[in-house]
Image (cartoon, helix red, strand yellow):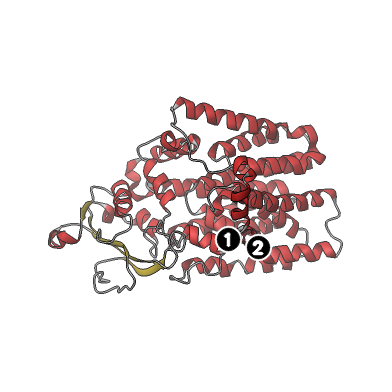
Amino acid sequence: MKRHPRLLITSAGLAAILAVLFSRTTGIHFDELNYMILAHYQPTGDAVRTGKPFAFYLLNYAVVHAVPAWTGGLRPVSLHLFYATLCVYSLAWLAARATETIGQFAWLFAALLCGPFFVFNTTQVMMETAVLPMLTLAVAAVIDLDRRGPVRQATALLFVAATLAILFKETAAAAVVILFVVFWPRLGRRLWPLALALVVGFGVQKVMLAVIQASGSENYGGLSTLLDVNALTLHAKLTGQYLSMWMFYVWPVTLLAVGVLYARGLFRDPYERTLLYLGGLSLVATIGIQLASNFALARYAYPSVWLGVIAFALLLMRGPRWLAALSIALYVFPIANMWRADPFRFSLWPPLVANEAHYSSYAILPGVPNLGWLAFAGSRRENMCILLARERAVGPEWLQRYFERVTVAPRFFDESQIADFSRCEGPKAILRKQHQETYACGPECPKGLFSQRACSATENRFISPGQILTNLTCLP
C-alpha cells in the first residue's frame, strides 16, 4: 500500500463511506425499497409498467444474482455495496486525472467524498446513485482530453460513461449537454463522444423499452411543461428552494472561498474560467429541470448539481490549502445531523431534500441502522417471527415485501395474533408505522430481547404536513 498511496487513500475513503452505509439510520425510501426487492426476481423491474429506464433494473438484477446465497445478509445489501464502491473508485479516477501530486489528489478526493452530496447519494440505491459514477467518469475523461490531448482511452471512456448515464436516467442528459457546451470552445470536435452518447443513449433506451413491450411512461415533465404558462408560474415558486438546495450541496463555504479568490485575481486561466462556466451552468440547469418537471423532486436535478459540486471543488483546490481544510472540516455538521433523532434529523439540510428523503410516509425502518443489521445479522435473519401492525398502519405491505426478500422464511403476525406471536419460536421483530398524534415507546421492546430499537414520531411533511406517523422498530 505504501507504494500505492492513491490506492491507500481510495481504500480509506471507501471504508468511510461503508461505515456511513452500515450505520445510517435515515430509513429506506419507498423507491429504494422497490429497487431492492425487484432486483431479486425481476430483471425488467417495473419498466414494463412505468416505462422507466430498463438498463438500471437490468444492472441491479445482474449484481444481486452475481452474489451467491451463502454470503447471507451481504446479498440483500449487495446493491448498496456495489454502488458505493463504484462511486468511490470513479471519484478516485477523477481525482487522479485532475491532479498532479499525491497531495493534490488527497485534498480533491476528500473535498468531494466527504461532502453532503456524495455521502448522501452513495449510501442509498436510487437511479441517481447509478448515474453519479458515470458522470464522474465522463468529467474525468473530458479533463483528460483537455489536459493531455487526444487519448483513445479517454475518448472511449467518455462515450461509454455518458451513454450509460443517460441509459440509467434521462435527467443525466442535461449534465451531458452542459459538459458539451462548456468544453466546446476548448476541445471542439474532440467532444463528439458526448454528442453521440445523447443520440445512442436515447435511441437504445427506446429500443430496450420496445423489446420488453413497455406499456407507457408517466408524464414526468419536459418541454411541454416548460412551455405551459400555468405550470411555469407554479413551479417558479419553488425556485428559491432549488437554489438553496444547489448552494447547500456545492457548499456555502466553498462558494464563498471561490468568490474571494476570484475577487483577488485568481481564475484568469482559460481552464479555470471553463470550470467557473461549468459551475454556473450547473445552477442554470438545476433551475431549468425544476421548471420542466411535473414533480417537485430534488433528485431529478442531482446529475446537474453534481457537475457544480465537482467544478467548485476543483476551483477550491487552486487556492490555499487552509481554505480547503476549513470547507471539508465544516462538512461534519450536516453529516452528523443525519443521525439526530426526529424531528431534528436533517434540520441543517434544505427542506426540499429532507422532506423528500425522510419526512414522508415513504421511509421505512427509520431510527435503526437497518442495512448494518441486515449485513451482519447472521442467523437472526432466519425463521423470524415478525409482529407487523396493520391498524391505522402506513404501508405494512412494504415492510412485509421487504422482509420476505431480505430474510429467510419469515412468519408474520398482526395485532389479532399476539398470542401466536408470543408462542412463535425464532428471532422476533416488531414493526409499527402508524397514523398517530401521540406516541409512547412502551415496554414492547425490552433491551434484552432486541439488538436494535427505535421509537419516534415523524411529521409527514412531504405528503401531508402536520400529520404525525409513529415509527417503532425492534430487530433481534
Q: Where on the picture, by quarter, is residue 380?
A: bottom left
Is residue 348 visible in the rendered image? The answer is yes
- Kind of residue at badge 2: Trp
In the rendered picture of this protein, how many numbered marks are placed on residues?
2
Query: Residue 251, labelled with which disc?
Result: 2
Q: Is residue 364 above or below residue 198?
A: below
Q: Is residue 299 left or right of residue 379?
A: right
Determine the secondary structure under disc 1.
helix
Q: Percent x, y for residue 450?
A: 27, 66
Rendered location of residue 6, percent (x, y): 64, 51
Determine the secondary structure under disc 2: loop
Residue plotted at (23% across, 51% down): 410
Residue 425 vs residue 60: left or right? left
The quadrant in which the C terminus is found is bottom left
Give the residue at x 67% y 36%: 158
Mark 2 in CB contact with mark 1 (< 8 angstroms) = yes
| Few, some or many residues within 10 Å of mark 2 (<14, 14–19, 20+) | many
Distance of label 2 from label 1 (alpha carbons): 8 Å
Q: Which residue is mark 1?
A: 116
Identify the residue shown where x is 16% and y is 60%: 416
As drawn, is 150 to the left or to the right of 378? right
